[in-house]
Image: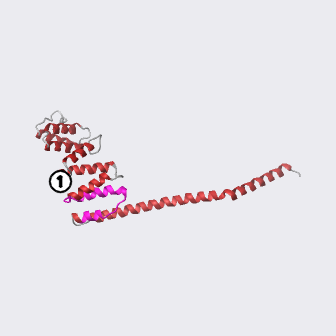
Amino acid sequence: MSNPDSFIEEVSEEVRRDRMNRLLRKYGWIGVVAVIVIVGGAAFNEYRKAQAAAEAQALGDAIYQALEGTSEQTRVLALEEITPDPASAAVLGLLTAAESVTGTETAIAALEAVIAGAETPDLYKDLARLRLVLMGDSGPARSERRAMIDMLTLGAGPFRLLALEQRALLEIEEGASDAAISTLQDVIRSAGASAAQQQRAAQLIVALGGDVASLLPEQG
């Protein structure tokens, strides 16, 4: 041979090709399966997204049609016939309670179901508690409302100041004027209190015989 090195390289290349072909025949199916899994997974995800969007659209349409009812009873019955997914059950319960203006028992049942829901976000649970508290004597017993108020005033929840106002009203009903004044003073001192909340609290304090001159900001 005139060029033994070239001959050896050609043989080595043929050996490598033969080995690669054997490997592809033996394990090539793994790559095919991997491609099928990737493509199939992407298609399934798109299907799930489309299905979720369709379900949300159907739920929204059903709620809209229910709220188009001409009477309270019609609207409430239509809302109760809707079968929501767990994530939407809380919203549907709050809507049902809001529409049950004269149906106190229906409203209470809907709100209590929201609170009891295992998958209900804490925000919706607190909103349901506040709604029950705002029902006053037509809602749950006073002791239950006080317990709900205590839960709402813990920490820095979004309904804390509204709950403090309701606590003050309960204390006034119970004849505990000093306690009510103290609660209302807490409302005025709270950094998150709006001007309207401070004004309401101040008016109640004055009506109860308290002084608010040192609590309210000076008017420029």
How many C-alpha atoms fall within 10 Å of the one at disc 1: few (<14), some, or many (≥20)?
A: few
Q: Position of residue 197 (x, y in %)?
A: 20, 43
- On whether residue 187 falls in the magenta region, the answer is no
Name the residue: 21% across, 39% down. 187
The quadrant of the rendering that contains the C terminus is top left
Name the residue: 50% across, 60% down. 44
Name the residue: 26% across, 64% down. 77
Q: SS of the residue at dot 1? A: helix
Q: Quadrant of residue 154?
A: top left
Foreground residue among 10 and 205 = 205
Q: Position of residue 181 (x, y in %)?
A: 16, 38
Name the residue: 11% across, 39% down. 208
**Coloured how?**
secondary structure
Q: Which residues are magenta?
A: 74-103
Foreground residue among 80 and 197 = 80
Q: Position of residue 176 (x, y in %)?
A: 14, 39
**Number of dots carrying numbers:** 1
Q: Position of residue 62 (x, y in %)?
A: 32, 64
Foreground residue among 4 and 171 = 171
Question: Which residue type does callout 1 highlight?
Answer: Ser
Residue lying at the far top of the rendered structure: 214
Q: Which residue is mark 1?
A: 138
Relative side of 65 to 195, left or right: right
